[in-house]
Every structure is written in structure tokens, then in C-alpha cells.
Amino acid sequence: MHEELENSYQQIIKSVGEDPAREGLLDTPKRAAKAMSYLTQGYNQTLEGITNNAVFTSDADDMVMIQDIELYSMCEHHLLPFVGRCHIAYIPNGKVLGLSKFARIVDMFARRFQIQEQMTHQIAKAVEEVTGAKGVGVIVEAQHMCMMMRGVEKQNSKMRTSVMLGNFREDAKTRNEFLQLLKS
């Protein structure tokens, strides 16, 4: 796959009118292929593989929140980056997940060609699946290069998406607690 990506990048360089044999571009197809492989590594990951049995029995039944998980993804419409933060909260139901696994879940879905709306849903469903939580809330806020670098070129625009499952959807008090914690 890596060689195929290199060849594709060489063709892109030619197609825009550049000389791939120019000194500064000689290794660009190789570097770009390596970068793209890294940026899309989520396709080669599974939820079971990244959580790696880090689910633990617990009596905790109050809200757990992980805030400001950085994310870097690629818009599936233009293959341009979007960058932002993800906030996850859940109400344990006899099980808790190791803290670093939340960041791994975010990365697994972010490291694919995505739209933010779908990624937010995937993260929430994955946390729900792994933990069996009574409720899950996920909010993602991101800036999209497809909106900033091209088209309407709006530099300060941000997109926010949210998915609320279980108690977070059904109980306004739980949802409001999550939203209030984000503000503090």
C-alpha cells in the first residue's frame, strides 16, 4: 500500500504542474505516503485492540468526565484536516475504562476520513459498548481547514457536535451537569 500511495503522490505533484524530480520534491511522495498512512491508521485498529482489556469492575456510579482530548482528523469531502477537542462523560454501570483508552478511542475514529457528526456518534457508541455505561455524552468542537483554507475562507469558524446516549439523553439534570462541568 505504501508504494501505491507514493506513486499517487508523485502523480498529484505532476498533475498540479510541478516537477517531482525537483530537489525539494524528490522525497515528498515517500514522506506524504508515510504521513497519510499515519493519519489514517484508525482503519487498522479495532475497539477491542485499543482498549486491551482495560475495563475494570468498580462501584463508582457518579459521572466521569474526560475533557479536552485533542483530535486531528481528515474531512472526507476534501481530504483536508480538521482539528479540535473532544469531551467525554459517562455514568459507570459497574465498570470503568482506563483513562488513556478514551484518547485511544478518539484517535481511532479521528484517524479515518470522517465527518465530525459521524465521528462524534462513533466515539459515543464505542464508549457505551465498552463500558456498558448508564449514559454517555460526547461533545466535539473543531476547526475545519476546508472551511478556512478554501471556499468561504472563514478563519474563526468552529463546529460543535454532541451525542447524548442513555441517561444523558433521557435526564435533563444529567445532561446539564455535563454541560456545566464543561464550563468550569
Image (cartoon, grey):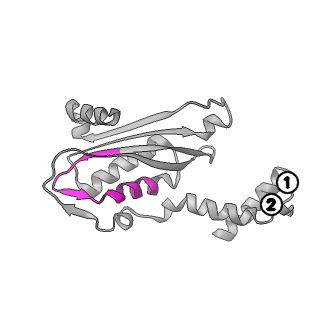
Asked if the magenta segment contains residue 91, the reply would be: yes
Asked if the magenta segment contains residue 99, the reply would be: yes
Q: Is residue 83 above or below residue 173?
A: below
Identify the disc placed on residue 159: none
Q: Amino acid at mark 2?
A: Leu
Q: Who is closer to the viewer here, 81 or 7?
A: 81
Task: Give the residue at x 46% y 48%.
Answer: 70
- Pointer 2 residue: 25
Rendered image quadrant of residue 20: bottom right
Helix, strand or loop at mark 1:
loop
Q: Is residue 7 above or below residue 160?
A: below
> Are the residues flagged by discs 2 and 1 in contact, CB closer than 8 Å?
yes
Q: Position of residue 61 (x, y in %)?
A: 15, 48
| Chain part drawn in magenta | 88-108
Given the current orientation, which residue lies at the most extreme front position?
Answer: 184
Label located before the other in sequence (2 or 1): 1
Q: Amino acid at mark 1?
A: Glu
Quadrant in which the C terminus appears: top left
Q: Is residue 38 left or right of residue 102?
A: right
Helix, strand or loop at mark 2:
helix
Q: Is residue 163 left or right of residue 72?
A: left
Q: Who is closer to the viewer here, 84 or 163?
A: 84
